[in-house]
Amino acid sequence: MKRKPLVAGNWKMYQTIAEARQLVPELVRGLQEIMGVQKVICPPFTALLAVKALLEGTDIGLGAQDLFWELEGAYTGEISPKMVAELCQYVIIGHSERRTYFGETDESVNRKVKAALEAGLIPIVCVGETLEENEKGLTEIVLQRQVKVGLQGIDLKLDEQERVPLLIAYEPVWAIGTGKAASGEFANNVVREVIRPELASLFGDQVAQATRVLYGGSVKAKNAGEFFGQTEIDGALVGGASLKADEFVGIVAAAAEG
Ligand code: 13P
């Protein structure tokens, strides 16, 4: 099964509109030459409209970093799926920073994933174990729970082009922003032995094999090839390095080489 690689930049809480207006043209210049990879950038909400305009006519997709599950209502400060869908094709859901600092649970992730799919958005659902869980040998149990509860009650199917309208990002929490990436082999084994089997038990083998699974955590231009050379890893969710045009372009180029 051939899965088209996807590389997404998660800008986190960086980039004002003014800063984004500098960065995006540099990204576009570097990325437009690279074929065979889906490219996505996920700016903060405030910069989405400006970035959308700058991406007009390019093949670079746009994503948000979160959403709320209700379509509208008295929810001060929240952004609904239909508001995100006016601007974006993708949305990151359940990032470990949201789980750690903002009380996100597998249940809230599940409600958000359902709402995103209903709005026609492609969720990038983040899973990953903490250092403590990893050291206690709990990686498998934690990931199984995050995938199972995060995706429960969803009828995930292949579309006419045999694609799955959802991605998983495996981001071991101990590798995020630490400069200590997981090894390509470790991440590949986790995807092969834990994440895809869990997807298969929920949605069947075909969907499990067609679902793209990204790796995230300290991906840079110089180590990206180690991940993209793995059979089970279909791209990357990039934090810090997505804010530097040459780094992000280098990562996407590495994905094109596979
Ligand atoms: P870094 O690439 O900065 O480690 O962040 C990874 C991440 O959290 C992407 O969502």
Image (spheres, rainbow, N blue to C red):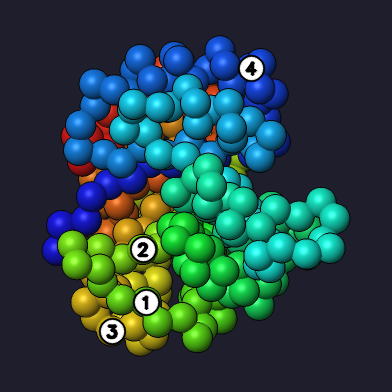
Residue 52: x, y in percent? 50, 31
Q: Amino acid at mark 4?
A: Glu
Say the numbered circle drawn on residue 19: 4
Q: Amino acid at mark 1?
A: Leu
**Within the image, what quadrant is residue 26 found in?**
top left
- Does the residue at mark 4 contact the one at mark 2 (Cβ under 8 Å)? no
Mark 2 or mark 1: name the one nearer the start of the chain: 1
Badge 4 element: helix
Residue at 31% over, 41% down: 38
- Does the residue at mark 2 contact the one at mark 1 (Cβ under 8 Å)? yes
Q: Which of label 3 and label 4 is nearer to you?
A: 4
Ligand 1 has an atom within 8 Å of the beta carbon of the residue at disc 1 = no
Residue at 40% over, 27% down: 56
Residue 93: x, y in percent? 58, 59
- Does the residue at mark 3 contact the one at mark 1 (Cβ under 8 Å)? no
Residue, disc 1: 156
Given residues 229 and 94, the one toward you in this image is 94
